Image (cartoon, helix red, strand yellow):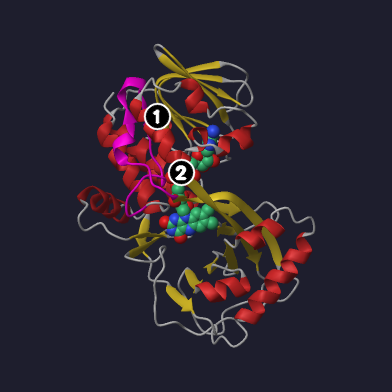
Amino acid sequence: MKLIKSNFSYDLLIIGGGISACVFASKYLKNNITKKVALIEIGRGLGGRSSTRISKRFRGWELNHGAPNFNISNSKNNPLLKNYIDELVENKFIKIDDSEIFFLNEDSNLDTIKKSEFSSGVNYLSLDSMSQLSQNIIDSNNLKSKIDFYFETFIVDLKFNDNEWVLTSKDGNKFKSKYIICSTNLLLHKRSLKILNINQIPLRKAIPINNDKKIDLLLNFLDKQSFIPRLTFLIYTNENYSFKDFYNKKQRYFYLKNSLENKYKFERIIFQMQDNNKLGIVVHSRNIEFINNHINAIDENVLKQKIITNFNKLFEDNSVINKLTFDEKFSIMKWRASQPCGVGVPLSLQFISKYRIGFCGDWFEGNGFGRIEGSILSALLLEKKFKI
Ligand SMILES: Cc1cc2nc3c(=O)[nH]c(=O)nc-3n(C[C@H](O)[C@H](O)[C@H](O)COP(=O)(O)OP(=O)(O)OC[C@H]3O[C@@H](n4cnc5c(N)ncnc54)[C@H](O)[C@@H]3O)c2cc1C
């Protein structure tokens, strides 16, 4: 939606358009079809950290550059989560991911211990891209037309007046609503001070200390939460690049054990087969020293050389992976906050009725903390608590 500076009024405003916001919005609207709802997202589309790079530079490529798939580590004792995942499977939005996962040990050989926080339990793959999964979720039950979407709109200020919330975007537009949902904790966390160049966390400014115990507690918990930065390298391989063997699944994952990760600075490498049969490669790194050295790298070519050299060394004797050449195309995604770490916020602080504000996302406590599992579950739980 294109904006001229104006005021917009809604029953409910949702800040953020990641997977948790999409799950919440689709469930909420199903039961509240007459409510006027808007979703405000700084990015150009839905998906957030579970999204897909659709390159303008390299046409035809769609690489999942955040979460490539997701795992549900435990839904046995959680019918709400289990039923929702079954619903996504029935709707053909996701399927069980039976792609190959390799765990590499110190010598780049296959490890017998096959464990990672991103692969335990049951793994699921979007039938389209990861961005499309968020789209599909919000489109389900044909509810998309019931929401006003404001993309490329960055909320920088929150105000709570007696009867309503007033949200201000960077470009000066005002959004008013009785209820709001924050599916991101940026406006609640101290990292907002640097990012927005302000001297008070926006939620703290809107609701000063000692007005509400739950808000104070929420902000205290978030004060102890930090974030893992990540660099993601996207490699658009040459036409003739392929696996050494015949492999016909959509993705193929390689996880590096700690000592190997320290040596190569790679955490995980995901091969992603494209519709045009080309093979994309996404390399994740969370090595702080490496990231600090390269996050502001002026010469991307130096970085590219290093990545390709390391890749070729890592897979030197591998039976399925071919070496890369130095003329593969390459781009980088820098995630300054890829995943929360430290303390998860208690789910009892998800909805604060006095201030008509709700929260969801992967930053809540539980099995799925820091992962899509936690984002989905927190959105489902919030919808149950949120009665307006
Ligand atoms: C590189 C990487 C790899 C990952 N791998 C995995 C994996 O394998 N498995 C897994 O389960 N999880 C993985 N994760 C984590 C997973 O992506 C997240 O847990 C999940 O996507 C979080 O979804 P969310 O909706 O809670 O938050 P987000 O996706 O962060 O959504 C919040 C949205 O709010 C928007 N926003 C923020 N502030 C504002 C504002 N002020 N105004 C407007 N919009 C705003 C953001 O742009 C964002 O789109 C990975 C993450 C990264 C970055």
Q: Residue at x 52, y 49 (%)?
A: 227
> Which x, y percent locates residue 48?
51, 45
Q: Residue at x 26, y 33 (%)?
A: 385
Residue 251 colored in magenta in the image: no
Res 323 quadrant in image: bottom right
The residue carrying mark 1 is 216
| Residue type highlighted by circle 2 | Lys
Q: Ligand 1 near label 2 (Cβ, under 8 Å)?
A: no
Q: Residue at x 57, y 35 (%)?
A: 192
Task: Work out whether residue 259 can be spotted.
Answer: yes
User: Which corner quadrant holds the N terminus?
Assistant: top right
Res 97 quadrant in image: bottom left
Taking the image as shown, residue 185 lies to the left or right of residue 266, namely left
In the rendered view, tell whether residue 320 sits above or below residue 52: below
Name the outermost residue toward the front.
Answer: 210
| Residue type highlighted by circle 1 | Asp
Residue 364 colored in magenta in the image: yes
Disc with the residue nearer the chain's start (1 vs 2): 1
Mark 1 touching mark 2, by CB under 8 A? Answer: no
The residue carrying mark 2 is 224
Q: Residue at x 53, y 81 (%)?
A: 106
User: Which corner quadrant holds the C terminus?
Assistant: top left
Mark 2: few/some/many CA within 10 Å (<14, 14-19, 20+): some
Residue range in magenta is 342-368
> Which x, y percent locates residue 303?
73, 64
Q: Ligand 1 near label 1 (Cβ, under 8 Å)?
A: no
Taking the image as shown, residue 248 lies to the left or right of residue 172, namely left
In the rendered view, tell whether residue 246 sits above or below residue 219: below
Task: Work out whether residue 128 can be spotted.
Answer: no
> Which x, y percent locates residue 325?
72, 76
> Which x, y percent locates residue 270?
53, 68
Label at residue 147: none
